[in-house]
Amino acid sequence: MAKQISFGNAVNDAERWAFKLLSNELPQNYLLLTNIEIPVHTGQAMEVDALIIGEWGIYVVDIKGYIGRLNAGQHAWSLDGRDVDNCLAKANYVARVLAGKIKHKIPVGVYAPWCQGMVFVTGRKGEGISLEKDDGSLSIYTPQQIVSALTHQWGLTAPKKFPVTEKQKEHVLETLGQVSVVERRNNRIQDFHKVKCLFIQHGLEIWQADYQPGDWSAPWLLKILVSTGFENEEMQYTQEQKLRDEFMRLQKLSGCNGVPYSAPLIQDGEQLVLPIKMPRGVPLSAFKPQEHTTYQLLEALKHSALALQQIHRRGYTVGNWSENCVFITDDGDIEYIDIINGSTLDEDIKNYATLFCSLAKQTHQPRIYQWYEQAALGRNLDLDWLCCDLSALIEMGICDGEQKAISLKKGAIIDHHFQLEECIQTSETSQLWRAKHLQGQYNCGISIYQCIDEHWPELSCLYRSLSHLFHPHIERVIAFGQLPASQDLFIARYWLKGCSLNELIHYEEQQPQMWFAQLLTGLQYLHRMNIFHGAVCPRNIICNPVRAVLVNFGVGLDIAAESYSQQYADPNLWAEENDIEKDLYGLVASFVDVLTPISLNNQRSRDFIIKALDAIDPNLVGQSLFESCQRVLSFNFSPDLSESYLTQFGLDPSSL
């Protein structure tokens, strides 16, 4: 691609098309000066369409958009039988004038380069032109011949042919005068100075530029739309609209991490310019992770995820996940330089994970690279989870090259987030700990269950559902998973103040009915979503003066093995009941066990639990509730999910 310096604007479509062809097709060491004026000895300035400083000579080119059959002779020309001007004579005259000026300027002992006139007939963008020359040596060429004539010796009319030296080129530029001034003017757009062309195609140019408002400078990118470079107005309008849309996106994303800063659009004559701050660092394709520490890589992943998260929260997506459009610094800062908003959120996260997966593997942190592997397959697209884990790894300085078993003792750290502080309860296969969330600095509960490997898929699905739901009378799950290098399950939940139902010593008269009603609403909420507790018993119900909460879904059977509701029921009837009826049976049996005035003496069977219910005064709980509980314990109760459990048990919503 030849270097083009414009001294004036093209006056017609033929010139614009010709300049584009010549600048694209001529070699890089050629200089194309367009619409330049050369003064003759009379003082009058003669405009030259194109002055080309090439390898073999200096060419004064006159451009004509003739369409039809052109017959060119030494003195007269005709186009489709009509006389037209002999343009070659004018070009040769200007070439002789320029040659004289160069000889005048050139020092003694230096040969002047050959100058000659030339005519370029373009037709209609290279078509619709037929040329016949009376003399084959005439320098008149069509688009199919012009580049070859300018780059080979046969295109010269000189008796002896010598290549133009760099020194001769310098003397030509000195003769023309102010070429460098014009070049600087052309390369300047307001306070931006174009330095290097990075891309040019179909009217779109991308330049590296310096912003020079005074004594300092800063690197920028300029996206330039040149209206004369498009083949038609429709294409120009489309590209202009895309550039304006990009500007609007960058303005609306202003302030987000990972989004480059952009200055206002510049409408400069025949071009529309979008200035974008040059991103720091290198493209991801040139980034070398092996030269950086694990923590630097984790910082980069964290910044990339946070930046993407902020972009999504503004209602946009990155869309373009090419390696060359993501820049990364040694400090881990990330910039997405081409935000096109062309995909859904899930697709964007999936493409993000695919691009950064190889970088995540370089951290050797299984929790991190496994997230990227799963997300790249379209699974587990939760950026919050990833950001939280990355923050924990960086802030706590925990980077395990391989998974190691955790010793459950005070001070141990679970899942990089939870520090065990006090063991509240323990059994052969489970433990309950009070813990502290290290980043959030708040108390939480950690339950550990041993040997649950065979039940893990079912429990994982259950707790994944619970982690996305909220009900004030259902435990709030923060996190869950398997401990490393073991078959133990951990569940992190919000810390609940209160005691289990079987540990109650004092309570107000109306509180048990309130707790029962609250737990009914919680169970119905879950049952409607096809989620079941599976282990309702007194020790899996936490009570305080204002509310009751169900905990330990699907696990913790051993915690209350002595009072587990299944032990109250007839085993044959229990096997036939569905999950809904089992949960309701467990809830009723738990309250009857704790509230009955008689002692069961650890004798738990269907007869004993019904006997315990009969010992409760119906007037204390209400006749309707008492009768409903009798039907539940006898497996004669048929719950209807479409109707409120409160109504079916004869309870008033005000009892909540």
Image (cartoon, helix red, strand yellow):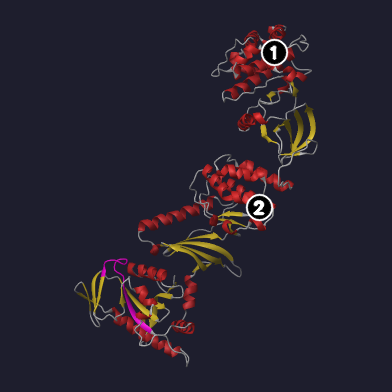
Q: Position of residue 324 (x, y in %)?
A: 54, 57
Please report the bounds of the magenta region as a residue range: 115-129
Q: Earlier in the sequence, mark 1 or mark 2?
A: 2
Disc 2 residue type? Leu
Does residue 314 appear in this view?
A: no
Residue drawn at x 53%, y 43% is: 345
Above or below, 381 relative to 474:
below
Q: Position of residue 384 (x, y in %)?
A: 62, 41
Q: Which element is circle 2 on? A: helix
Confirm or deny contact between disc 1 and disc 2 (CB under 8 A): no
Q: Position of residue 573 (x, y in %)?
A: 62, 12
Above or below, 179 relative to 370:
below
Taking the view exactly as shown, the residue that stands out farthest to the bottom is: 108
Which residue was labeled with disc 1?
A: 568
Residue drawn at x 54%, y 41% is: 378
| 345 drawn magenta | no
Q: Position of residue 259 (x, y in %)?
A: 57, 53
Q: Which mark is residue 297?
A: 2
- Image quadrant occupied by the N terminus: bottom left
Does residue 190 appear in this view?
A: yes
